[in-house]
């Protein structure tokens, strides 16, 4: 009998989505399963899917690691490679990685849909290993930039694929928690890079070790993903119903397979073609969600968060604060905020965390702007406001603006366009990230921290307003319930 139920549903798809819902209702009554499973016989054991999530978060760990790997070591790199004091070259070491991430993000959707989520993770690990090796062995700036370009390409592929995978293999009652695991992994990667980079200023050439270290988790990701479950969503979309059932059994347990397949089929619209054109995302019925997702990512980047991660050492040094201990505090604040978000996201919901996060970030950036004013300098409070504001900013970012946008977007996008729409939104993210990384130091020199931090605070406030007026709550709903609620009229 294995595989027949899924295959039978595959044959019924020509009748449109409403027919699927009726078939499902007649056969299963009011029982709801996939991702929203267990409303009648209890939720599946979360321990079945958690190991697969854990492996997937290695890509997020690598993402966080390479966000911070040049933070402590940038000065040593610039001295060894002969561009010390050149702020544009230092910015390029950061922004070239982000340019590569933009390129990777453009293709991430096609890769994830073409070869599947598991193979996409493995393809992501390959340029990561190559790029790290090139950066670790280079003798000049050109080799460093080329290595960073390869690493950036992998960073562009990894996060959207990880978000897709986590969303599609997680039961609804822990989907927010699992989604926060990717942010925690990013924090651990960032914190790890800061710890490993501590000896960079004392030990000549230590920065090369910092790059070599990241080869290990990339290789582990490629190896362990061979034993992880493929996304049943992707398998069913490719017409491989029997394999989808097998993966559901691996992720949820045998009693949940039949209803999980039926639930997944509810949102399928057999009258729609499998191929997705980018024009559909930019002008079609899915434009609204793509616009909301892209705007969330844009506001996330315009808040100034990655300027903090990339250049916190420089900022702390200008404030007269030892960068080593301050950067570790930044990493710890990021981790604490992410853990708190993991505990709250399935209780308070996505929207509440986003509004609170952007509001808190606005307050924190205002403190940093105040620290740069003449009033704070005369009162002797500049250092405390600067460091305190930065730590508060990172903490509140990790509570919502960090983990929620990617999770929210992957929840609200229909399965047929999910991968390519995510790629489009992430491309927006990386373009803005690129220019923030490239121009931050120059803007800091030319307009000063007071005006720059005020601009960042304004964008944070705009983020809170945008979320309040445009973002719907998805807490506790299955992907199919969300998709059906957002389906355009036929």
Image: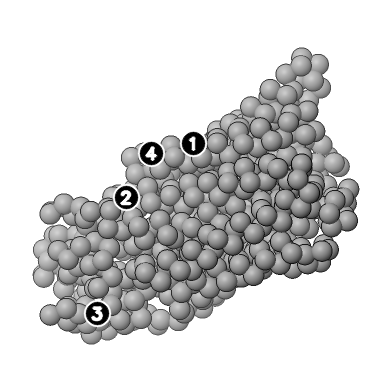
Q: Residue at x 34, y 44 (%)?
A: 346
Instruction: Give the Cα distance between marks 1 and 2.
Output: 19 Å
- Earlier in the chain: of badge 4 and badge 1, it is 1
Of tags 1 and 2, the one toward the viewer is: 1
- Earlier in the chain: of badge 3 and badge 1, it is 3
User: Looking at the rendering, in which quadrant would you find the N terminus?
Assistant: bottom left
Which element is circle 2 on?
A: helix
Instruction: Identify whether 243 is placed above or below 435.
Output: below
- Where does the image place residue 231, in percent across and percent down from the top left? 36, 69
Q: Residue at x 14, y 63 (%)?
A: 255
82 to the left or right of 148: right
Of tags 3 and 4, the one toward the viewer is: 3
Q: Which mark is residue 336?
A: 1
Residue 120 in view in this figure: yes
Q: Quadrant of residue 132?
A: bottom right
- Earlier in the chain: of badge 3 and badge 4, it is 3
Q: Which mark is residue 174?
A: 2
- Name the one closer to the observer, 293 or 397: 397
Of tags 4 and 1, the one toward the viewer is: 1
Q: Residue at x 71, y 67 (%)?
A: 134
In contact (CB < 8 Å): disc 3 and disc 4: no
Which element is circle 4 on?
A: helix
Q: Which residue is mark 4?
A: 344
Instruction: Give the Cα distance between marks 2 and 4.
Output: 11 Å
437 to the left or right of 413: right
Q: Which residue is mark 3?
A: 242
Instruction: Identify whether 241 is placed above or below 151.
Output: below
In contact (CB < 8 Å): disc 1 and disc 2: no
Instruction: Give the Cα distance between marks 4 and 1.
Output: 12 Å
- Earlier in the chain: of badge 2 and badge 4, it is 2
Q: Residues within 10 Å of mark 2 (few under 14, many from 20)?
A: many
């Amino acid at each position: 009998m294995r595989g027949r139920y899924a295959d039978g549903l595959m044959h019924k798809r020509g009748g449109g989505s409403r027919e699927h819902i009726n078939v499902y209702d007649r056969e299963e009554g009011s029982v709801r399963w996939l991702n929203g499973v267990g409303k009648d016989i209890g939720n599946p054991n979360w321990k079945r899917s958690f190991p697969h999530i854990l492996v997937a978060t290695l890509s997020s760990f690598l993402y966080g690691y390479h966000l911070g790997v040049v933070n402590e070591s940038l000065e040593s790199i610039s001295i060894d490679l002969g561009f010390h004091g050149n702020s544009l070259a230092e910015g390029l070491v950061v922004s070239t990685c982000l340019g590569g991430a933009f390129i990777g993000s453009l293709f991430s959707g096609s890769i994830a849909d073409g070869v599947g989520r598991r193979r996409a993770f493995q393809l992501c690990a390959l340029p990561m290993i190559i790029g790290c090796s090139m950066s670790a062995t280079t003798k000049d700036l050109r080799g460093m930039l080329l290595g960073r370009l390869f690493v950036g390409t992998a960073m562009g592929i990894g996060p959207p694929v990880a978000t897709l995978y986590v969303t599609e293999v997680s039961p609804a009652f822990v989907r927010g928690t699992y989604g926060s695991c990717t942010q925690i992994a990013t924090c651990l990667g960032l914190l790890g890079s800061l710890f490993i980079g501590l000896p960079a200023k004392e030990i000549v050439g230590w920065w090369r070790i910092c790059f070599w270290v990241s080869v290990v988790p990339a290789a582990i990701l490629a190896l362990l993903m061979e034993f992880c479950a493929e996304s049943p969503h992707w398998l069913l979309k490719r017409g491989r119903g029997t394999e989808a059932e097998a993966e559901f059994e691996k992720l949820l347990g045998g009693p949940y397979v039949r209803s999980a397949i039926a639930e997944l089929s509810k949102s399928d619209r057999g009258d729609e073609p499998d191929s997705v054109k980018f024009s559909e995302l930019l002008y079609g019925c899915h434009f609204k969600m793509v616009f909301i997702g892209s705007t969330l990512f844009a506001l996330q980047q315009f808040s100034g968060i990655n300027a903090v991660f990339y250049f916190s050492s420089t900022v702390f040094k200008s404030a007269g604060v030892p960068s080593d201990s301050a950067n570790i505090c930044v990493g710890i604040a990021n981790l604490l905020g992410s853990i708190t978000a993991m505990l709250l996201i399935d209780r308070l919901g996505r929207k509440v965390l986003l509004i609170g996060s952007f509001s808190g970030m606005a307050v924190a950036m205002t403190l940093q702007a105040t620290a740069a004013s003449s009033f704070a300098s005369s009162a002797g409070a500049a250092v405390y406001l600067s460091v305190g504001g930065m730590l508060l900013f990172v903490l509140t970012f990790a509570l919502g603006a960090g983990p929620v946008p990617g999770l929210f977007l992957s929840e609200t996008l229909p399965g047929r366009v999910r991968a390519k729409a995510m790629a489009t939104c992430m491309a927006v993210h990386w373009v803005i990230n690129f220019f923030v990384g490239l121009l931050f130091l120059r803007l800091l020199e030319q307009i000063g921290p007071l005006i720059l931090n005020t601009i960042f605070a304004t964008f944070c406030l705009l983020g809170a307003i945008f979320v309040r007026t445009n973002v719907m709550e998805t807490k506790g709903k299955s992907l199919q319930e969300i998709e059906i609620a957002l389906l355009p009229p036929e």
